Image (cartoon, helix red, strand yellow):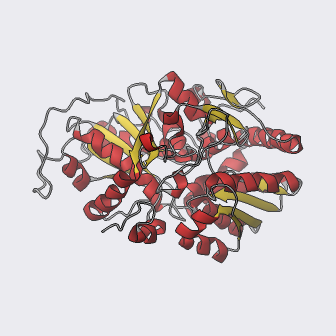
Amino acid sequence: MNFSTTPLVATSLAAETGCVAKTSSAAKTSGVTEPGGAVTASAVAGPSCAAKANCTAKLSCVVEPSQLDTASTAHRRRPTPTGHFGAYGGMFVPETVIPALYELASVFDELLSDPEFHRELNYYLTSYSGRPTPLYFAERLTRECGGAKIYLKREDLNHTGAHKINNAIGQLLIAKRLGKTRVIAETGAGQHGVATATAAALFGVECCIYMGEDDIKRQSLNVYRMKLLGAEVRRVGSGTKTLKDAMNEAIRDWVTNVRDTHYAVGSAAGPHPYPTIVREFQSVIGREARAQILELECRLPDAVVACVGGGSNAIGIFDPFVDDTNVELIGVEAGGLGLATGSHAASISNKTRGILHGSFQYVMCDDDGQIKNTHSVAAGLDYPGVGPEHCLLHDTGRAKYVVVTDVEAVSVFRTLSRLEGIIPALESSHAVFHAMEMAKRMDSDAIVLVNLSGRGDKDVQDIIRGQDLGREVTV
């Protein structure tokens, strides 16, 4: 189980374009363009690379396995044989599932170097899910902020409406290789549940999704979608009735039915080897974004921003940029009602560590190690832990983790909808809010790249009710 350094999809880098990967200064010197003002060339400069002769080559973001360049990916971070990223991670699970985890790790390691697996995965990612997703220059949003250019990686345009399908397809292909006839998953916002149900329908596998009662209420559309796709949705009424408890029940199911069931963990969390598996399947986001920004701008962004709950979309876009030390990586946690209130889901910002769902990590816990209740307007961020690689990136200083509150996220839900015609998921709204605040303080030639991890159809009714904010929200 040494986990090959070969990525699942090859990286297209500056060598293919002749571009120099450089970053600009981030200090803001220009004034703020007034909202509603006319767009002029001096106010907002769009993608600048298209006219440059050395950058006109079209980049291929999804390629054949024969094109994989293992030499250029030797930097990839691997866990120890027991699944540790530094002090974090591990396999703190019942003995019943230890053999299944080792089998999963072994099979996945083999698949990393299996050309046929790469071809099959790439086929479904392109022909079924619709990859590559576009990198979009948000011109009106940029003008509103008056500073850095803001680019959106449009994961909301994936089949099923979020990044979760990348991992779901990969994990169902693994389940097929393992000979499993049933798949289970946990879900909070419902996006991973929908993606897993979709992939299960595609491959003809029995599917069961665990979801907390509170999340079922606020994500009723996704519950219906899962059932429509043929999945059984099991209501979890214990604990906080949210994502944490759904994962608890899924693990209990897996312990009981491990012989015929594959547990398709949706986040970059859980016991080894899941954090690595999810990172590998989601890192297609960052590989595409890196190639696309080089094609459009002939350089790398100054910052990459993504929301963080368990951390799958964030580690997916961060991964190909980790060695680009001039690119700032920023994870945005759910600040809920504010850190001072204790009613939030910002595990790293909470600065306490413990074991949750088979992994040592930053968690929301008290002095006795008991997991605290969490809160976020975004169901997908309402989780009391975070993946082990995020913990390591934080401790080494390679990534920075900040918080955005419910009210701030909801404000961007409206802003992005009105300025760009894009209704973002509330999870993604956290990242967009912080990116906008950053952009205001940066030069107009700086670049901020945001992972728009999902679309917001699922959140509209919740916003109308305003139930999570305790007041009516006017849209």
Total marks in image: 0
Relative side of 330 to 234, left or right: left
Q: Position of residue 133 (x, y in %)?
A: 46, 55
Q: Is residue 285 above or below residue 81?
A: below
Q: Is residue 154 above or below residue 43?
A: below
**Residue drawn at the location 18% of the way across and 45% of the way down:** 146
The answer to whether residue 119 shows anywhere in this view is yes
Q: Quadrant of the C terminus?
A: bottom left
Which residue is more in the foreground, 145 or 367? Answer: 367
The answer to whether residue 135 shows anywhere in this view is no
Q: Position of residue 225 (x, y in %)?
A: 60, 73
Q: Is residue 201 above or below residue 71?
A: below
Which residue is more in the foreground, 246 or 272? Answer: 246
Q: Position of residue 82 (x, y in %)?
A: 76, 29
Which residue is more in the foreground, 355 or 257? Answer: 355
**Residue drawn at the location 54% of the way across and 39% of the way down:** 347
Residue 447 lies in quadrant = top left
Q: Quadrant of the N terminus?
A: top right
**Residue drawn at the location 43% of the way across and 34% of the way down:** 329
Q: Position of residue 332 (x, y in %)?
A: 44, 42
Which residue is more in the foreground, 298 or 283? Answer: 283
Relative side of 327 to 3, left or right: left
